[in-house]
Amino acid sequence: MATRYWMVSLPVHNSASTLWNSLQDQISKHSFDTPLYRFNIPNLRVGTLDSLLSLSDDLFKSNSFIEGVSHKIRRQIEELEKVSGLESNALTVDGVPIDSYLTRFVWDEAKYPTMSPLREIVDGIHTQVARIEDDLKVRVAEYNNVRGQLNAINRKQSGSLAVRDLSNLVKPEDIITSEHLLTLLAIVPKYSQKDWLSSYETLTSYVVPRSSKKLYEDNEYALYTVTLFGRVADNFRASARERGFQIRDFEYSPEARESRKQELEKLIQDQDSLRSSLLQWCYTSYGEVFSSWMHFCAVRVFAESILRYGLPPSFLACVLSPPVKSEKKVRSILEGLCDSANSTYWKTEDEGGAMAGLGGDGDAHPYVSFTINIA
């Protein structure tokens, strides 16, 4: 599937079918590897020249916005498919692959009545796409919120002992809690374990001798218990901190552990559910945005062609996808079919043309042309 297309219109001097046959013939002779398609635009309502000029000023900005939203949804789809381990699905508009929708475009009269003013059609498309973008932001924020909570829990469960949740590492028999005695959990740097074992009994008074037991070790730290009288716990914490040992607050609670487990399971279910619904929404919404974008492009070609070639509307619109190596040749073919004695008037600004950039495109030609990037 091509991902980059030119949407162009050429002025018709005799008949559109003659011009189309000439274009097909030239392309097949000189650039046979360039796909070429008619782009069928209905007779839209022209309005006044002033309204067309005003509309033309806004078309480029609106196109950038709509194109940006389509790419944003596409990137979101790719990310969700990757996370879900799914193969990339071909994106569609109502079941039609997007490249086919573009190259076999048919105007939706029911959705966009051709008798509506062009400004009304363009504003309606812009509003619809803006609504979809707002909806996307809300849905992605909801999904990311749950994903963020899960990531935070996973960090606590898989991070270093200095930050991780210790409830899965400590058993009830490791903890002593009585009227006078309590057990603290110490996080000891991995290479300071000898120092801990030789010093913990003397960090304060009333420490139970030989009460320290190693429960777990990771790449950075070891987790030790130590039992002492409750009234000296604060002194012990302070002395341990001075020696580079961290005392983690911990209270063993089967209920809290079960509650955290249930919370984790619910978050996983919520994440899977939100990801699935967001992905389905993105598939549908991408089709809506792409369809809106192609109708917008049809209006853009129509408006620019009227401004370029005058009234009554008489132009041939088509879509091409030339390989990079053939672009210059195809440009030359298109320019030759314009039959314009003043073609230099439309050269790019660098070449001294007076009308370069009509409609916001960086390079102008003696025919209407702009690029569609669908990926």
Image: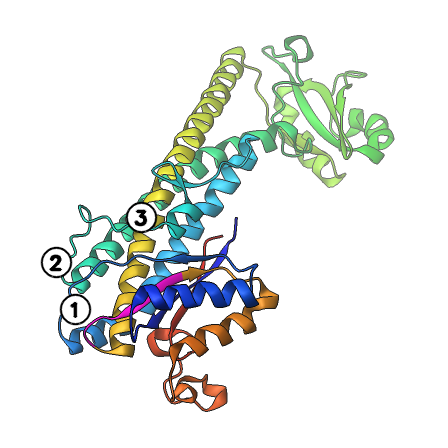
Mark 1 sits on what residue? Answer: 46
Which of the labelled discs sits on residue 216, or is there none? none
351 vs 340, left or right, is right
Mark 2 element type: loop
Query: x and y percent of residue 238 in the render?
Result: 67, 36
**Mark 2, other Cα within 10 Å: few <14 / some 14–19 / many ≥20:** few
Number of numbered discs overlaid on the protein picture = 3
Q: Earlier in the sequence, mark 1 or mark 3?
A: 1
Q: Nearer the viewer, residue 372 or 229?
A: 372
Q: Amino acid at mark 3?
A: Asp
Please identify the quarter of the rendering in which residue 354 is found: bottom left
Would residue 314 be counted in the magenta stretch?
A: yes
Please identify the quarter of the rendering in which residue 55 is found: bottom left
Q: Amino acid at mark 2?
A: Met
Q: Is residue 206 visible?
A: no
What is the magenta range? 311-318
> Which label sits in the foreground, 1 or 3?
1
Mark 3 sits on what residue? Answer: 134
Coloured how? rainbow
Q: Nearer the viewer, residue 68 or 114?
A: 114
Q: Nearer the viewer, residue 218 or 18?
A: 18
> Which label sits in the foreground, 3 or 2?
2
Q: Amino acid at mark 1?
A: Val
Q: Residue at x 46, y 83 (%)?
A: 348
> What's the CA distance linking mark 1 and mark 2?
9 Å
Name above or below for residue 249 compared with residue 58. above
Mark 1 element type: loop
